[in-house]
Image: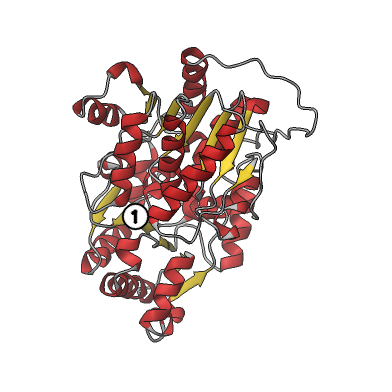
């Protein structure tokens, strides 16, 4: 997605969504759609691989960016600094009424600082998550964003309690749920699409493991990455195929281990390029077990009611650990927990089937839209003369049917 320079005033009188990664696209799309023509998108390009970004704009029904800033491929400091500077230039030509950021990325922090520098009201979607792990750069990003935001949309009561514990004025905090619930519900393919995709990969419902690894704590440490792929390979040998969509960072790290991570690995793990959001959900809804270091998948597993092994040091989503997931370090614990879950899979799935996601009821975007309109005066919209504004249609909603056992 090439750099684009917005026309003067492109962001004036708008609700501007600053985003730069796949999770931000997915989670902000339901809210952006509700604002229709008033919504504008400033895309930083933090995920600069088209497979990790462009396809998600289309699949999630989000308008194409009004500005693309191309900060991907740089260090954390460079991404934040360049994003802040370029966003400030965009806002100087026409200030939004409100800026919305999501989560804990460098893009979100750049957007928060750019809004704060110009005194523009700032909304933080997915506020208050805390891992209490200072080794995580995302932890610092979240704390900084929360303390400059004017409206903090906490997905759960526990998140709101974290904010109160840090002395943030409770009047700035609202418990809204997480927009991931409605994003997933609208994007989940129907059973026919799911069945075709399973056939394409040569797997059966409830008879395969779906794995992802992308966090630097795992990919940048050969010992940790080697331990993860070794356990996945052993699970593959046990008779259940392991599907492994490989993040570009992970692909490069696997090459450094030799032979894509170990001799014969490709015979035991089915590796493929990153998947679009709909295809990933289709597989996740039908798998026996998820193994991942992703934060978003911790949320999605609770909506799909799939068991999950979280492979990382810490998590900012303890709600998922209560019923749906277990947190482990790379190594034998992965195989130990996986085999225990697989041995009792019918009972595990029955136990999850009636549980509600702790991340909300699918109305988070509606609540957040109402809060924004209530708390911040939005300027009257003027018709655009130079450019027609495309407002994507709302994708057809599919019920989250109980996956096959």
- Is residue 339 positioned above or below 233 on the image? above
Residue on which disc 1 sits: 345
Compared across the picture, whether 366 is left or right of 210 comes to right
Residue 113 visible: yes
Residue 76, percent across and down? 38, 55
- Helix, strand or loop status at disc 1: helix
Residue 313, percent across and down? 23, 56
Compared across the picture, whether 376 is left or right of 145 comes to right
**Which one is in front, 226 or 32?**
32
Compared across the picture, whether 221 is left or right of 404 comes to left
Residue 399, percent across and down? 55, 36
Residue 403 visible: no
Task: Please tell me which residue is depicted at 55% across the width and 23% down the height of the picture.
Answer: 97
Task: Please tell me which residue is depicted at 43% across the width and 48% down the height of the picture.
Answer: 81
Task: Please tell me which residue is depicted at 57% across the width and 27% down the height of the picture.
Answer: 95
Q: Residues within 10 Å of mark 1 (few under 14, many from 20)?
A: some
């Amino acid at each position: 997605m090439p750099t684009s320079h917005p026309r003067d005033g492109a962001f004036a009188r708008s609700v501007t969504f600053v985003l730069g990664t796949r999770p931000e696209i997915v989670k902000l799309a339901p809210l952006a759609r509700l604002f229709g023509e008033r919504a504008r998108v400033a895309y930083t390009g933090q995920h600069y691989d088209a497979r990790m970004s462009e396809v998600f704009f289309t699949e999630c029904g989000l308008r194409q960016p009004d500005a693309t800033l191309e900060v991907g491929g740089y260090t954390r400091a460079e991404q934040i600094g360049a994003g802040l500077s370029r966003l400030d230039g965009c806002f100087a030509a026409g200030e939004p009424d409100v800026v919305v950021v999501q989560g804990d990325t460098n893009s979100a922090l750049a957007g928060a600082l750019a809004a704060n520098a110009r005194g523009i009201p700032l909304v933080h979607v997915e506020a208050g998550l805390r891992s209490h792990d200072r080794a995580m750069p995302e932890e610092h990003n979240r704390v900084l964003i929360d303390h400059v935001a004017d409206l903090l949309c906490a997905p759960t009561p526990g998140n709101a309690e974290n904010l109160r514990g840090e002395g943030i004025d409770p009047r700035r905090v609202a418990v809204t749920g997480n927009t991931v619930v409605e994003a997933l519900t609208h994007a989940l393919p129907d059973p026919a699409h799911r069945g075709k995709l399973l056939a394409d990969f040569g797997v059966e419902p409830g008879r395969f493991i779906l794995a992802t690894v992308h966090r630097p704590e795992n990919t940048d440490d050969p010992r940790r990455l080697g331990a993860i792929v070794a356990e996945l390979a052993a699970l593959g040998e046990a008779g259940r195929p392991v599907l492994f969509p490989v993040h570009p960072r992970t692909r490069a790290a696997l090459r450094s281990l030799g032979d894509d991570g170990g001799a014969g690995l490709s015979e035991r793990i089915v590796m493929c390029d990153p998947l679009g959001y709909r295809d990933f959900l289709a597989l996740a809804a039908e798998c026996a077990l998820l193994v991942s270091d992703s934060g978003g998948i911790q949320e999605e597993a609770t909506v799909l009611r799939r068991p999950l092994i979280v492979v990382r040091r810490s998590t900012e989503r303890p709600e998922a650990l209560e019923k749906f997931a277990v947190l482990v370090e790379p190594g034998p614990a992965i195989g130990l927990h996986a085999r225990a879950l697989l041995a009792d899979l019918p009972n595990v799935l029955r136990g999850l089937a009636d549980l509600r996601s702790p991340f909300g009821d699918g109305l988070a975007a509606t609540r957040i839209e109402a809060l924004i309109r209530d708390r911040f005066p939005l300027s009257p919209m003027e018709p655009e003369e130079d450019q027609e504004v495309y407002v994507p249609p709302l994708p057809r909603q599919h019920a989250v049917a109980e996956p096959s056992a």
